[in-house]
Amino acid sequence: MIAMRPIDQPAVLDEINAGRFSGPVEGYVVMDGPQYLGNFLYKVENGVTWVLDEQLADPSLVDGAVRAAVAAGENRGAVSFCINPDSPRLAYWKQVMFKNGPDILENKKLFHSCKDF
């Protein structure tokens, strides 16, 4: 079973981030039982979840990583999110999901688009 666990150790976050992103960077590790599948980084600032980077063994995990990051931000009050265009697989995910949408997207575009029947 795949699990995404928040990284709660600052030294681990610092090592993964390696000074690439400023501010209060957060992240998750992705595991399949005892097998490490990678990690992803994000930060929440001014009501926006910034999905910064992913280092995942399988590109099929990117969608879940983005959704987990955006959900974590939403739980802390963020109402929108932005995908780092410099991360190739994140940029590809955004292109597939939102075509040429704006840089900053409302969370409801990702989570709250179901219609009543």
Image (tube, rainbow, N blue to C red):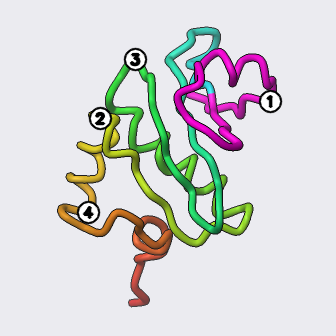
How many angstroms separate mark 3 from mark 4 (CA)? 24 Å
How many angstroms separate mark 2 from mark 1 (CA)? 25 Å
Vertical relation: 117 (above or below) 33: below
Q: Residue at x 60, y 56 (%)?
A: 71
Instruction: Identify the element where label 3 is drawn.
Output: loop
Q: Nearer the viewer, residue 31 or 53?
A: 53
Q: Are marks 3 and 2 in contact (CB under 8 Å)?
A: no
Residue 58 figure quarter: top left
Residue 49 figure quarter: bottom right
Q: Amino acid at mark 2?
A: Arg
Q: Earlier in the sequence, mark 3 or mark 4?
A: 3
Residue 89, label in figure: 2
How many angstroms separate mark 1 from mark 3 (CA)? 21 Å
How many angstroms separate mark 4 from mark 1 (CA)? 31 Å
How many angstroms separate mark 4 from mark 2 (CA)? 14 Å
Q: Are marks 4 and 1 in contact (CB under 8 Å)?
A: no
Q: Are marks 4 and 2 in contact (CB under 8 Å)?
A: no
Residue 104 figure quarter: bottom left
The magenta region covers 1-28
Q: Quadrant of the C terminus?
A: bottom left
Location of mark 3 (residue): 57
Q: Amino acid at mark 3?
A: Ala
Location of mark 1 (residue): 8
Q: Amino acid at mark 1?
A: Asp
Q: Position of residue 113 (x, y in %)?
A: 41, 76
Count neighbours of disc 3 (C-alpha within 10 A) and say few if under 14, some if 14 to 19, many if 20 or more: few
